[in-house]
Amino acid sequence: MEEVFRGRAWVVGDDIDTDQIYHGTYLPITDPKEMAKHAMEYVPGIEDFAKKVEEGDLLLCGRNFGSGSSREHAPMSLKYCGIKVVIAESFAGIFYRNAVNIGLPLVECESLPGFAEPMDIVEVDIKTGLLKNITKNTEIHGAPLPDLEMEILEAGGLIPYMKSHGMFPGVGAGA
């Protein structure tokens, strides 16, 4: 699995909830590529995000990113529209867990405000938490994911991790 990602920065503020990331009206959609077309549709200040985001872009967020309902649709829509890593001052617990479970890397960084402007080129090492703003030639440190979360990401998400550790009857290691 990649550990260092470089891409354009999409910058959003505090308290972006799951309805803003992926609105409840789209819950009947089950195809992740179709879900991606509605990512961040209700977030102010980034109109047409799903049409403009490019594979490899990074999402930089304020405090409490992903609060709201327990739906894996929110991180899934981000992953499938091309976002490679979500970096935030802090994450809502349910978003954090859902993102790790579907294999979307996260980095928490309290000193994120003012680090990047929209479309700056940013690099992040998810193993060390080092963030570099290539455009501004600056760097800050965030918190890397704990070991278990890194193992889940490296496996491709929670289901592949569980299969590889024989946690499903008749599947994977020990079967």
Image: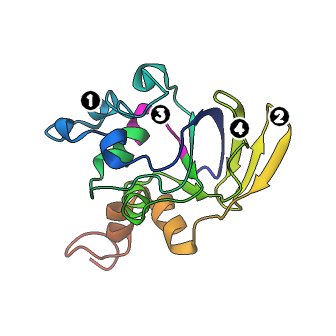
User: How far across and how far down the image is residue 125, in percent?
Assistant: 69, 53
Q: Position of residue 161 (x, y in %)?
A: 39, 66
Pointer 3: what residue? 82
Mark 2 neighbour class, 10 Å CA radius: few under 14, some 14 to 19, many 20 or more: few
**Magenta span:** 79-85
Q: Nearer the viewer, mark 3 or mark 2?
A: 2
Disc 2 from disc 1: Cα separation? 35 Å
Q: Position of residue 56 (x, y in %)?
A: 56, 34
Question: Could one spot residue 34 in this view of the protein?
Answer: yes
Question: Element type at marker 2?
Answer: loop
Residue type at numbered disc 3: Gly
Residue type, label 2:
Lys
Marker disc for residue 136? 2
Do residues under tags 4 and 2 come within 8 Å of each other at their CB atoms? Answer: yes
- Residue 34 badge: 1
**Which residue is tagged 4?**
116
